[in-house]
Amino acid sequence: DTEVTQTPKHLVMGMTNKKSLKCEQHMGHRAMYWYKQKAKKPPELMFVYSYEKLSINESVPSRFSPECPNSSLLNLHLHALQPEDSALYLCASSLGQMNTEAFFGQGTRLTVV
Amino acid sequence: GQQLNQSPQSMFIQEGEDVSMNCTSSSIFNTWLWYKQEPGEGPVLLIALYKAGELTSNGRLTAQFGITRKDSFLNISASIPSDVGIYFCAGQLYSGGSNYKLTFGKGTLLTVNP
C-alpha cells in the first residue's frame, strides 16, 4: 500500500461551520504534512508532524487546527474559515522528516461560502 | 526564505518533442525533487536527487542535481499526450533543530499537442 488517502475529496462549508479533513497512510511513515495549494500555485507548507508531535507550524491562523491521533492518521480541523481559505488541501507523508520522498494524497478541494 | 526560480512558466509542444525545464536558487539545497501534478490530483514524485552532480533517469525522464547545489534540470524525451500537467521542482534544506523544509518552484505547465 503506497497510498495517502484523503477524505472528503470535495467540501463546501459556511463561514460559521466546523469541519474536519482526514488523511490516512499505512506505509509506516512517521512524518506527515499538511499543505495548502491555490490554483496554479505551488503547495505551501502549513504543518509538519514528526512521530505524532507537531514539528513545524508555518504561522498558520488558529482557525486551522491539526491533530495527529496516531502514526497513520492526520486530521485538520476547520472553524470559522474565510472565503480566501478556499483551496486544495494536500496531505503528505514520508518515512521520516529527514527523508524527503514525500507521497501526496489527492487532496481535498475546499470551498468556503 | 529560500526562493526557487523555475522556468519556463509554460510550454506548448508537439507530441514526440523533447522538453527541458530547470530550477535555480540563490541558496544551496541538500536535495532536489521533481513532482508532476495533474488536474484534481496531488503531486506525484518523479525523481529525487541527493548528491551534487547526480544524474538520474526514470523512463523518459532525466534529472540532474547541479554541481553548485543551486540548480537542477528535468528533461522529458519523446513527449506523449499523457505528459501533460504541471511540473514542480522542490528543494530541501536543513532549517535547524530537527526541521527540514521543502521549498517548491512555481511550476511549469506542459501542454502536449497530439
Image (spheres, coloured by chain):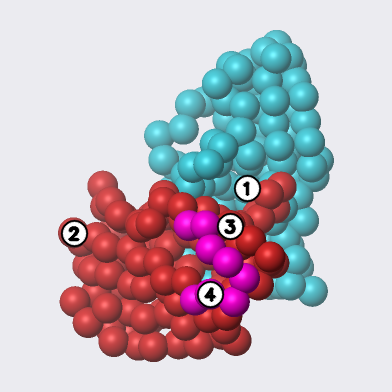
Question: Which of labels 4 and 1 is toward the front?
Answer: 4
Instruction: Look at 63% across and 61% down and name the residue there.
Output: B113
Q: Look at label 2 and name its amino acid.
A: Ser
Sequence-first tag of 3 and 2: 2
Whole-Å distance between the Cαs marked 2 and 1? 27 Å
**Colour-to-chain, red:** B
Question: Are the residues tagged 2 and 4 within 8 Å (C-beta)?
Answer: no
Letter of the chain that mark 2 sits on in the rendering: B
Question: Are the residues tagged 3 and 2 within 8 Å (C-beta)?
Answer: no
Callout 3 crowding tier (Cα within 10 Å): few <14, some 14–19, many ≥20: many
> Which residue is identified by label 4?
B17
Quadrant (top left/top right/bottom left/bottom right) for the C terminus of chain A: top right
Sequence-first tag of 4 and 3: 4
Instruction: Look at 55% across and 46% down and name the residue there.
Output: A35
Q: Is residue B27 left or right of residue A112?
A: left
Q: Look at label 1 and name its amino acid.
A: Leu
* Range of residues picked out in magenta: B11-18
> Which residue is identified by label 1?
A90
Letter of the chain that mark 4 sits on in the rendering: B
Q: Look at label 3 and name its amino acid.
A: Thr
> Which residue is identified by label 3?
B111
Q: Is residue B18 left or right of residue A58?
A: right
User: Is the same chain shared between marks 2 and 4?
Assistant: yes
Whole-Å distance between the Cαs marked 3 and 2? 29 Å
Q: Is residue B36 left or right of residue A106?
A: left
Question: Which of labels 3 and 2 is toward the front?
Answer: 3
Quadrant (top left/top right/bottom left/bottom right) for the N terminus of chain A: bottom right
Report helix, strand or loop for mark 4: loop
Residue B40, given in percent of the width and then of the height, sits at 71, 47
- State whether residue A4 is above or below residue A57: below
Q: Look at label 4 and name its amino acid.
A: Glu
